[in-house]
Image: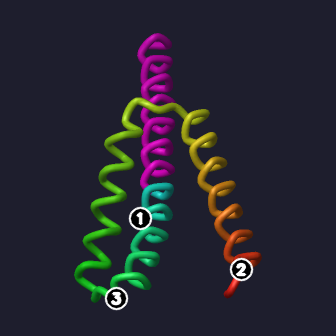
Amino acid sequence: MANIISNVQDRLKTSTNALALLGFKLLTGLFVGLTLALIGQEVIQYELISFVLVVLVVTGALVRIAKSWSWTHIFIFNLICVLIGLLCRMYILIAPGA
C-alpha cells in the first residue's frame, strides 16, 4: 500500500511540474507574441484579426521551439528577452533625430 501511495505522489509531483512548466512557456510565448504583434500593428497598421493571429502564431511557435527546454532554459530566454527590450528602449530614448 505504501508503494502505491509513493507512486501516486511521484506522478502527481511530476505532472504538476510539467503543467507549471507548460504554463510558464505559454505565458512567455504570450508576452513575446503580444510584443511582436504590437510592434507589427504600429508599423503595418493591421486590424484585430491579424493582431490575434500574430499573437497565436508566435505563441505556438515559441511553445513548439521550447518543447524540450527546462526551467533554466526558459529563465535564460526570458532574461535575454528582457535585456533586448531594455536595449531597444535605450536606443529609442537616445536615438538621434527623434
Q: From the viewer's side, name the closer residue of 88 and 21.
A: 88
Q: Earlier in the sequence, mark 3 or mark 1?
A: 1
From the viewer's perspective, is 74 left or right of 79? left
Q: Residue at x 34, y 83 (%)?
A: 44
From the viewer's perspective, is 62 left or right of 14? left
The percent position of residue 84, horizontal first and vertical second, equals 63, 56
From the viewer's perspective, is 7 left or right of 75? left
Q: Which residue is mark 2?
A: 96
Q: Which residue is mark 1?
A: 33
The percent position of residue 51, horizontal first and vertical second, equals 31, 78
Q: Secondary structure at mark 3?
A: loop
Q: Secondary structure at mark 1?
A: helix
Q: Nearer the observer, disc 3 or disc 2? A: 2
Q: Which residue is mark 3?
A: 45
Q: Earlier in the sequence, mark 3 or mark 2?
A: 3
The percent position of residue 73, horizontal first and vertical second, equals 56, 34
Badge 1 density bin: few <14, some 14–19, many ≥20, Cα 10 Å: many
Boundaries of the magenta span:
1-26
Q: CA distance from mark 3 to mark 2?
A: 24 Å
Mark 1 belongs to which amino acid?
A: Gly
Residue 79 on the magenta segment = no
Q: Residue at x 42, y 34 (%)?
A: 15
Mark 2 belongs to which amino acid?
A: Pro
Q: Magenta residues: mostly which secondary structure?
A: helix
Q: Count up the numbered dots.
A: 3
